[in-house]
Amino acid sequence: MKILFKRILLLLSLLLLWSVVALYGGLSGWWLKPLAHKDDVNGFTSAIERKLATEVRGNVALVLIESGEVVYENYNHSLDEINRETLFPVASMSKFFTALGVLEFTEKYQASLDQPVAELINGWQLPESPFDHSKVTLSALLSHTAGLTDSLGFADYQNAEDVPNLIDSLNAPQAIDGVRAITVGFEPGSEWAYSGGGYLITELVVEEQTDMAFESWMQQSVFAPTGMSRATYDPISTLDNHSKSYDKVGTAAPLYYYASPAATGLSLSAHDLVQLLSSDLISRHSQALTQPIGNKLGAPIWGLGAMLYAPLDDAQGQSNKGQFIFGHDGSNEPAINSTLRINPSSGDALIVLSTGGDFLASQIGYEWVLWQSGYPDFLHFERAIASAWQPMFSGFVVIVMLLMARLIFAKRKQKRH
């Protein structure tokens, strides 16, 4: 009985150990296959073209950049005639630009990212809570670590005249599923929790400190200096050459308005993003943008307004701590999806703007990150985990068979003696 117990314990220990290894391998991309070899640009773009040919349900603009130069553009797989200047709503990618605007503000006005926002605004304050509000700073708001629990997600408006002003939005922000209060629900700095409401607060900080409308500050500090001539917070339906709106299956849908320019209200063109990447604005702030602040399951996923999609290895294949593929995705109803992803070590980047379909921009972004780094991005955590199941169970079979073979061999050896 004692020998049997030891054998069962050994089997369970080996199975558990292999489970951990297999899951770690899934999160590290061991079981995932990129669309092409890392240096095969033509192979990657050919694979993406096949994906676009079968999955586009609206309009898609795609730009691939290698070493700072545009090497591929695709505006063909769309329902309408679009080009590099066509305006797309980018939803939460707006937050990345807000972060750039805030960083420009702190630089020009010599303000601190770590100063309590309560000291920077007069027109509104967070409701009282049992937590330390002095830790609610611009840094915490931009990285979603300020302890806010609203999880916004802003509602859609079909008439621009119905969109509430900034103070009304702060008091009673409208989400898709109703009103959500912007409150501190846990200790700031203790964990990461997505908050669109935090970006409403940064919007107010910029307006009160610069004495300018948020949109004007962004035009002056971010869009004009980088040549982003079409970037705007104006209702997209009132502007020329804009992408039409479609739902996930490709049915025409209304063009909506959003209550927060800072969090979700920006529209821009693919060429605007190319212009941004060719300027020095991101590189000047890259250290702040990619400073790991927000963590999930122990992994760094958010900097100051930037998603940290995946780590980058150095030339020897060792983890290059502090280097990430970064940028921002955006999604909203009925089917807005956008991604900007940047590899700072190579100057490579991906731009995808889409209306219609099922998160096509983010799917292509995932494939690009895997192709660039060998790692799955954190937005597709489930896909990385799912890739581990087959190797895990295959390993289980091998372990059981090896232990059985060992047992049979041992019994035969005993019979010979």
Image (cartoon, rainbow, N blue to C red):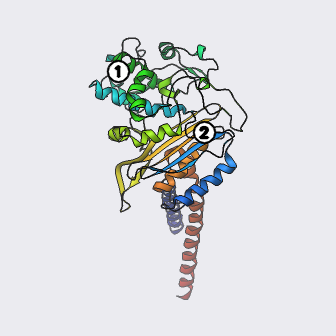
184 or 166: nearer the viewer:
166
Residue farthest to the left?
A: 110
Residue 116, image x and y in percent? 32, 22
Which label sits in the foreground, 1 or 2?
Answer: 2
Q: Is residue 336 above or below residue 15?
A: above
**Which of the labelled discs sits on residue 76, or is there none?**
none
**Which of the labelled discs sits on residue 117, or is there none?**
1
Q: Is residue 4 left or right of residue 189?
A: right
Q: Residue at x 36, y 57 (%)?
A: 314
- Residue type pointed to by label 2: Ser
Q: Is residue 116 left or right of residue 20?
A: left
**Which of the labelled discs sits on residue 354, or is there none?**
2
Secondary-structure class at tag 2: strand
Q: Residue at x 56, y 25 (%)?
A: 154
Residue farthest to the top?
A: 123
321 or 47: nearer the viewer:
47
Residue 360 appearing in the image: yes
The N terminus lies in quadrant: bottom right
